Amino acid sequence: MIARVLHDSLGALTIEESARYDPLTQIRHVDWYWSSATKKDFWRVALPMRNIFPQEMPLLVASGGLRLIERFGDFDRGPLTAESMRQICVCGL
């Protein structure tokens, strides 16, 4: 389970996730399934996400005419580590 949310008319909703990774395209195919107390998986949201490896990011940023100022492993500005699920970049001109 990813989350529980309270909807005004549908009541308590549960969000679950399934994911698979294609290493050739570097795309992580994520599906979110929304369920209510009366109807399981009534809504599916596909979230294809392109993975950019940490070694690629500085090159991509530079090729776009920017410079990489800082890089973090989460939105709380934690360090980018091998265990980080995110790569947050602060870039400038």
Image (cartoon, grey):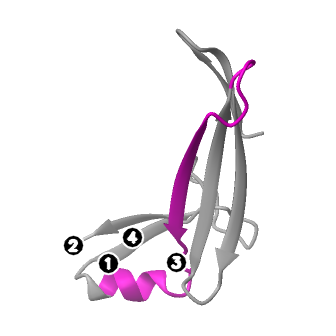
**Residue drawn 31% across the image and 85% down it:** 62
Residue 52 marker = 3
Separation of disc 1 and disc 3 at Cα?
16 Å
Task: Kindly indicate whether the residue at mark 2 contacts the one at mark 1 (C-beta within 8 angstroms).
Answer: yes
Task: Kindly indicate whether the residue at mark 4 contacts the one at mark 3 (C-beta within 8 angstroms).
Answer: no
- 38 displayed left or right of 74: right
Between disc 3 and disc 4, the foreground one is 3
Q: Identify the mark nearer the N-term, 3 or 4.
A: 3
Residue 93 marker = 2
Separation of disc 1 and disc 2 at Cα?
6 Å
On screen, 32 above or below 30?
above
Depth check: give the residue in front, 74 or 45: 45
Amino acid type, label 2 = Leu
Amino acid type, label 4 = Ile
**Residue drawn 32% across the image and 78% down it:** 67
Q: Identify the mark nearer the N-term, 1 or 3.
A: 3
Q: Look at mark 1 in the image and give the residue it sits on.
A: 67
Task: Kindly indicate whether the residue at mark 4 contacts the one at mark 1 (C-beta within 8 angstroms).
Answer: yes
Separation of disc 2 and disc 3 at Cα?
21 Å
Q: Which residues are magenta?
A: 36-62
Classify 10 Å Cα crowding around label 4: few (below 14), some (14-19), many (20 and above): few
Q: Identify the mark nearer the N-term, 1 or 2.
A: 1
Between disc 2 and disc 3, the foreground one is 3
Classify 10 Å Cα crowding around label 3: few (below 14), some (14-19), many (20 and above): few
Q: Look at mark 4 in the image and give the residue it sits on.
A: 69
Q: Identify the mark nearer the N-term, 2 or 3.
A: 3
Amino acid type, label 1 = Arg
Amino acid type, label 3 = Ile
Question: Which quadrant holds the N terminus?
Answer: top right
In magenta segment, residue 61: yes
Depth check: give the residue in front, 51 or 18: 18
Q: Measured from the top left, where is residue 16 in percent x and y?
A: 72, 42
